[in-house]
Amino acid sequence: MQLFSELGYLTPTAPFDFAKSLQFLGLFMPMQNEQELSSQSLTKAVCIAGQTIGFQVTAIGTVEEPKLEYTLFSAQPIAPSIKNAVIDRISFFLSLTDELQPFYQVAAKDPHFLPILEQLYGYHQVKFLTPFENACWAVLSQRTPLNTARKMKQAIVEKLGSCLTVQGSIYWAFPESAQLAVVDTDELVNLIRNKRKAEYLSAVARAFQEVDEEFLRTADYEKVEAWLRKIVGIGTWSAAFILLRGLGRMEHVPLIEKKLVEVVSQVYGQGETMTHVAIQSIAQRYGACLGYWAHYLRFVSCFAVKPMV
């Protein structure tokens, strides 16, 4: 089948190292097997307003003068509104406009963190493709082994999502909230074999169907957190997770989270478990960049990226 396509270019805020983004995606469990990665390119699919769009993004610049080439693919003509929405989604997903310099200025004065900064220099946080997908993953992964949650997510995508064949490969797009909101809860139970999670997924889908994502991206942190906490199945940890990894809200991080405490203790405490007060004292230096500090630390701890010491 002949596909419609659109070609264009994006200019990330420097420094930007797309190779680091690709490395993260290759190891990030919630998105494994959902895209095709090469040394300098990413191919993936997304559903926008009911239309499945494949996108291929390739690095054609340098870390200090970054530039990305994108190609969009669809079985239907790509209207300007859809094109703009996909470009916005790609940019937000890859955090292309994030300004790293304020974070780096603080990190450069932190001798314990400096080796991590040097190794991950130019890495912009790769979010979940949509905050709705992030919220669904938060539900699926609650008190559940990651491999089991991943199988649940794959079952949802292959039954309720959509796909597009690009250059001989099939790419699946996670369903939009509107698609999932109309699915009977019993059908979700049959898919994931967990009644409580199915009910939570339905509640998440209905909530996200009714909210403007611009509100989630830009409203006061506390207002967005409160909105998320009202959704059945979204607790304190899940709300913070979605705010950071689905919306790029870097203002706050739950410093008592087990994995973060472990890696902070490894990097700053020479392996000795640090107190919450001590961790908070370090975190306060990073101010509004706190989320990037925590995310770089988690990248090191969870994805076998060893600090150069």
Image (cartoon, helix red, strand yellow):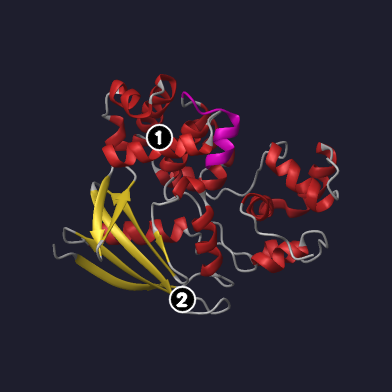
In the rendered image, residue 193, in percent from the top left (x then y), is placed at 38, 24
Left or right for 52, reference 232: left
Q: Residue at coordinates 69% horizontally, 41% vertically from top-left?
A: 259
Circle 2: residue type: Lys
Span shown in magenta: 232-242
Comparing 90 with 1, the one in front is 1
Q: CA distance from mark 1 to mark 2?
A: 36 Å
Comparing 246 with 191, the one in front is 191
Residue found at the very far left of the displayed protein: 1
**Residue 67 shows which numbered tag?**
2
**Residue 110 shows which numbered tag?**
none
Left or right for 59, reference 15: left
Q: Earlier in the sequence, mark 1 or mark 2?
A: 2
Circle 1: residue type: Met
In the rendered image, residue 122, in percent from the top left (x then y), is placed at 60, 68
Left or right for 87, reference 76: right
Rendered position, 212 above or below 126: above
Left or right for 120, reference 79: right
Q: What is the secondary structure assignment of the residue under circle 1? A: helix
Q: Residue at coordinates 14% horizontally, 65% vertically from top-left?
A: 2
Q: Residue at coordinates 32% horizontally, 52% vertically from top-left?
A: 46
> Residue 76: which quarter of the image?
bottom left
Q: Is residue 231 magenta?
A: no
Rendered position, 219 above or below 120: above
Q: Is residue 240 magenta?
A: yes
Q: What is the secondary structure assignment of the residue under circle 2? A: loop
**Residue 152 shows which numbered tag?**
1
In the rendered image, residue 73, in percent from the top left (x then y), is placed at 25, 63
Of badges 1 and 2, the one in the foreground is 1
Q: Residues within 10 Å of mark 2 (few under 14, many from 20)?
A: many
